[in-house]
Image (tube, grey):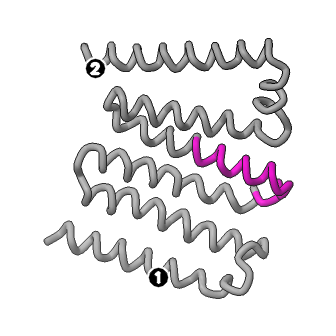
Amino acid sequence: MASQNRGRIIWGLLLVFFGLYLLAVQFFPALRGFAINQDTWPLLIVALGVAFLLVALLAWRPVWMIPAAIVGGIGAILFWQNLTGNWTSWAYLWTWIPGLIGIGVALMYLMQGNLRQAIVQGGALILLSLAAFLLVGSFYGAIGMYAQYWPLLLILLGVIVLAQAFWRRA
């Protein structure tokens, strides 16, 4: 019960601070120019990811690391795309989402003190994401001269899956 109440207090404080921030943006034009413009709007998404991270840490809710990694990572991708104008990169950057989930899963297990699960579960998703990125990115020319080597990641992923199968049996 106390942990649940702590989580509500943290969420309440985050909402109050975000509301104060938005109120300040309404009344101070200089702040509005920085806060919500064509270059910085994705930082609001990154900030939401940071809010999830703070809740995960302060309320000790390890599972909240997963949405923190997903939302914060997508915000970072959008920020990069917005700065570079390379919006067509979404054709292959979507493959990073399983890797963001993997980062969140790894952080969740690390918070729980389970290093093995962090490496196995999070690492598998990160490797899968990297393989998908190299595969799809090679079709769009995003990888450059390294595109011919993406099958090595599939081989590595296959070896990891085989090792897990034999490890679990033993």
Quarter of the rendering containing residue 166: bottom left
Q: Secondary structure at mark 2?
A: helix
Quick one: 103 or 165, which is closer to the camera? 103
Badge 1 marks a residue whose secondary structure is: helix
At label 1, which amino acid type do we have? Answer: Ile
- Quadrant in which residue 27 is drawn: top right
Residue denoted by label 1: 155
Circle 1 packing at 10 Å, graded few (<14), some (14-19), many (20+), is few
Quadrant holding the C terminus: bottom left
**Residue drawn where x is 37% and y is 37% of the image:** 63
Q: Measuring 25% from the left and 44% from the top, which residue is drawn there? A: 112
Residue 4 placement (x, y as % from top left): 32, 17
Direction from residue 38 to residue 59 in the image, left or right: left
Question: Which residue is disc 2 drawn over?
Answer: 3
Q: What amino acid does circle 2 point to?
A: Ser
| 79 and 21: which is toward the camera | 21
Q: Residue at x 17, y 69 (%)?
A: 169
